Image: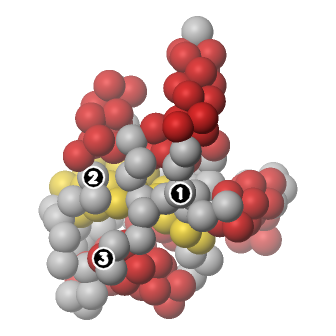
Amino acid sequence: MILVSVGSSDDGFDRVVRIVDELKGEGKIKDRVVAQTGYGSYKPKNVEECFGFTSWEEINRLNKEAGCVISHGGIGSILTSLQYSTPFIAVPRLKRLGEHTNDHQVDTVKVLESQGKVLVAMDKNSMLQCIQRVESGWKPKTTRSSSGVVKDIMRFLDR
C-alpha cells in the first residue's frame, strides 16, 4: 500500500495528490493507494481510499503498514516514516507555485536525500522514477542512533 499524505497545513497540496492519481489511472502504480487530501480541492478519481483528515494514531498505523509514503517535505511526516523505516518520497511544497511562503522544504529534503533517507520527486516523471526505485527494493538508510534520535524528537513533539 502507498500512503499519500499532505499534512495538516491550512493550504491544500493538490499537486502531489494529482500526480499520484494520474499515475494510478495510467496503470503505472499497481499498489493500493490511500490518500490523505487535507484541505485540497482536487478529488482523486483513481485511488482506492481518500480522506481529508484522521487521527495521529491512524496516520501512524498507516505509516507502519505502508510499503511507501509519498508526502510533502514537512519534517514531522518524514520523521514518522523514518521511525518505521518506511520508504519516503518527498514532494516539497514550492514557493513559486504558491504552496508555501519559502522553499525550506526543498532545502530539507535535499539534505535528507543526500544522506539516503528519502527520495525526492519534483514532478510526475521524477515521481515515477522514485516509485520504481522503491519497487526495486530501495530502503531509507537508518542507523540505530538515528532511530533513537527520531524517537526522541517524536516524543518531544508529542508534548
Residue 36 versus residue 88 in the image, above or below: above
Q: Nearer the viewer, residue 86 or 146?
A: 146
Is residue 35 something one can see in this rendering?
Answer: no
User: Of marks 3 and 2, which one's residue comes earlier in the chain?
Assistant: 2
Tag 3's secondary structure?
Answer: helix
Q: Type of residue at label 1?
A: Lys
Query: Disc 3 versus disc 2: distance between alpha carbons?
Result: 13 Å
Q: Are marks 3 and 2 in contact (CB under 8 Å)?
A: no
Residue at 53%, 85% in the rendered image: 126
- Residue 67, by quadrant, is bottom left
Give the residue type that dot 3 points to.
Glu
Q: Which part of the image, by quadrant, shows the N terminus?
A: bottom left
Query: Which numbered marker is on residue 66?
Result: 2
Quadrant of the frame with the C terminus: top right
Please determine whether, in this image, residue 61 is positioned above or below residue 68.
above
Residue 142, placed above or below residue 135: above
Alpha-carbon distance for marks 3 and 1? 16 Å
Whichever of callouts 3 and 1 sits on the residue coming sooner in the sequence is 3
Q: Nearer the viewer, mark 3 or mark 1?
A: 1
Q: Nearer the viewer, mark 3 or mark 2?
A: 3
The residue drawn where x is 49% and y is 59% is 140
Q: Earlier in the sequence, mark 2 or mark 1?
A: 2
Residue at 79 percent of width and 71 percent of height: 96
Q: Position of residue 105 (x, y in %)?
A: 72, 56
Circles 2 and 1, Cβ within 8 Å, touching? The answer is no
Q: What secondary structure is marked by label 1?
A: loop
Determine whether, in the image, residue 48 is placed left or right of residue 8.
Answer: left
Check disc 3 and report the residue beneath it: 135
Q: Quadrant of residue 149?
A: top right
Q: Which residue is mark 1?
A: 141
